[in-house]
């Protein structure tokens, strides 16, 4: 079986909401919902949240989920390249 790592990019502000992924989503936040959906998938060894927000970093850490701070990128491609270097396998 392969060692699968899932990385969820998260922002505290985006084009759709001033709250970004921390916007209310039912009884939780959009970010909590994303995390819960990924945890339901089998064969995933680790889940990480990738963010350039200290607010989201703290929010995710308090929930016991793996998180890492990334640089601010102009393009999505740069975010993927950074993650690929962090998790080369």
Image: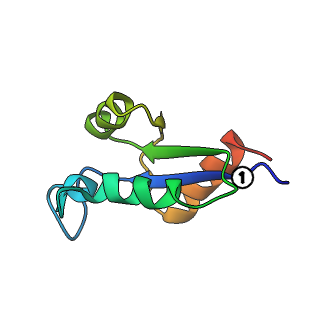
Residue shown at 28% from the left, 56% from the top: 21
Residue 11: x and y in percent read 32, 52
Q: Position of residue 39 (x, y in %)?
A: 51, 53
Q: Residue at x 17, y 64 (%)?
A: 17
Q: Can you see residue 74?
A: no
Residue 31 visible from this viewpoint:
yes
Q: Secondary structure at mark 1?
A: loop
**Vertical comparison of 40 with 47: above or below:** below
Instruction: Give 77 or 20, whichever is nearer the viewer.
Output: 20
User: Where does residue 71 sit, x and y in percent of width and height?
Assistant: 46, 42
Q: Name the residue located 56 percent from the left edge and 57 percent from the top edge.
A: 78
Residue 35, placed above or below residue 15: above
How packed is label 1: few (under 14 Cα within 10 Å), some, or many (20 or more)?
Answer: few
**As drawn, is 21 to the left or to the right of 77?**
left
Give the number of callouts: 1
Residue 70 horizontal side relative to residue 43, left or right = left
Residue at point 14%, 58% (across, down): 18
């Amino acid at each position: 079986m392969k060692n699968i790592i899932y990385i969820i990019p998260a922002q505290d502000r985006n084009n759709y909401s001033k709250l970004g992924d921390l916007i209310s989503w039912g009884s939780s936040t959009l970010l909590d919902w994303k995390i819960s959906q990924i945890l339901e998938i089998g064969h995933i060894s680790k889940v990480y949240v990738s963010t350039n927000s200290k607010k989201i970093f703290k929010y995710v850490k308090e929930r016991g989920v793996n998180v890492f701070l990334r640089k601010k990128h102009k393009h999505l491609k740069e975010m993927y390249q950074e993650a690929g270097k962090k998790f080369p396998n």
